[in-house]
Amino acid sequence: MDSNSIEMGTHVIDGVRHPISTPVKHIENLPNLEIFEDDVVMTSPKSGTTWMQEIISMLRYGCDVQKADQEYIEKRWMFIDIHLNNQKYVHLPIVFVCRNPKDTAVSFFYFHKMVKHFPTYDSWSEFLNDFCDGNLVFGDWFSMNSYWWSQRNDKNVLFVKYEDMQRNLSDVVEKVASFLGWPITDRNLPELLKHCSFESMRSNKKVNYTEHPRVDTKEIPFMRKG
């Protein structure tokens, strides 16, 4: 499918609502995806996905900003439920970022206004009803977060809170680095923290989606308040 001409709307596959850009066959084939012990990074939507992606990119490249920025973020990562050209699987442990539902819902509401092939909502109350009913794209926030919370003690899962990233990013970065087995030196930590600050990421065209063909950030920026 041409990523520049994606049809508007959503559809439900196996009880979960997905963008129309997600093919039914792709979802049906996911159970056959070979999973390794060192496999996947994931978060629920609008809970700090891009933030965590950039942190891990910096760790992966030894805190080298130029290497982290050499490719657009969508080329470095893959959303396994969406089939896009030229993306590859990245083998990483599971890092799940949870954000409180109120802020997640607000961020997701504005996200629907940006993504060209997502349905828009005329009112916040209409959107909130769908959010609470689990009737938005990517499924039920409550069941997803409850499940990963129940898995938080699994050795292959790191459960991170978005609010902890806001309060003490340095502490979270060190936990992620230790979990991945990619140690970070005291000398490199300040560079990573500076690069992954909200202000830095908001102005970074490699991560702020200002040049993405399917995201309209003219009226509403992808990164609003953080």
Image (cartoon, helix red, strand yellow):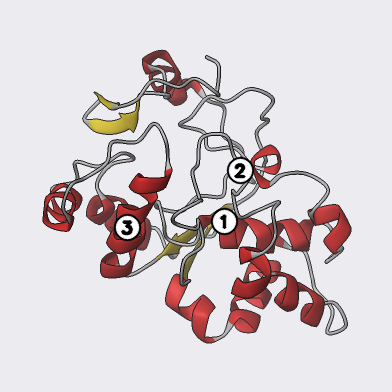
Left or right: where 183 falls relative to 117: right
Instruction: Count residues near mark 3 (Cα–Cα under 10 Å), then give few for <14, some for 14-19, many for 20+.
Output: many
Labels 2 and 3 touching (C-beta < 8 A) = no
Query: Which element type, helix, strand or loop, lies under badge 1?
Result: helix
Check the image and report above or below for 219 versus 169: above
Instruction: Count residues near mark 1 (Cα–Cα under 10 Å), then give few for <14, some for 14-19, many for 20+.
Output: many
Where residue 39 sits in the image (x, y, percent)? 61, 43
User: Mark 3 or mark 2, which is nearer the start of the sequence?
Assistant: 2
* Whether residue 179 can be seen here: no
Q: Which residue is mark 2?
A: 39
Between disc 2 and disc 1, the foreground one is: 1
Query: Which residue is found at the position 19% from the left and 41% from the top?
Result: 135
* Res 64 quadrant in image: bottom right
Check the image and report above or below for 182 versus 138: below
Left or right: where 13 falls relative to 179: left
User: Mark 1 or mark 3, which is nearer the start of the sequence?
Assistant: 1
In three-dimensional space, the C-alpha distance between marks 2 and 3, rounded to whole angstroms, equals 19 Å
Q: Which residue is mark 3?
A: 145
* Whether residue 82 can be seen here: yes
Query: Which residue is found at the position 25% from the left and 42% from the top?
Result: 136
Q: Residue furthest front?
A: 219
Where residue 48 sits in the image (x, y, percent)? 49, 62
Q: Which residue is mark 1?
A: 50
Q: Amino acid at mark 2?
A: Asp
User: Which residue is nearer to you in this view: 223 or 40?
Assistant: 223
Query: Which residue is found at the position 74% from the left and 70% from the top?
Result: 195
In three-dimensional space, the C-alpha distance between marks 3 and 1, rounded to whole angstroms, equals 18 Å
Q: Amino acid at mark 3?
A: Asn
Query: Which residue is found at the position 59% from the left and 72% from the top?
Result: 198
Check the image and report above or below for 1 versus 201: above
Between disc 2 and disc 3, the foreground one is: 3
User: Which residue is nearer to you in this view: 146 or 67?
Assistant: 67
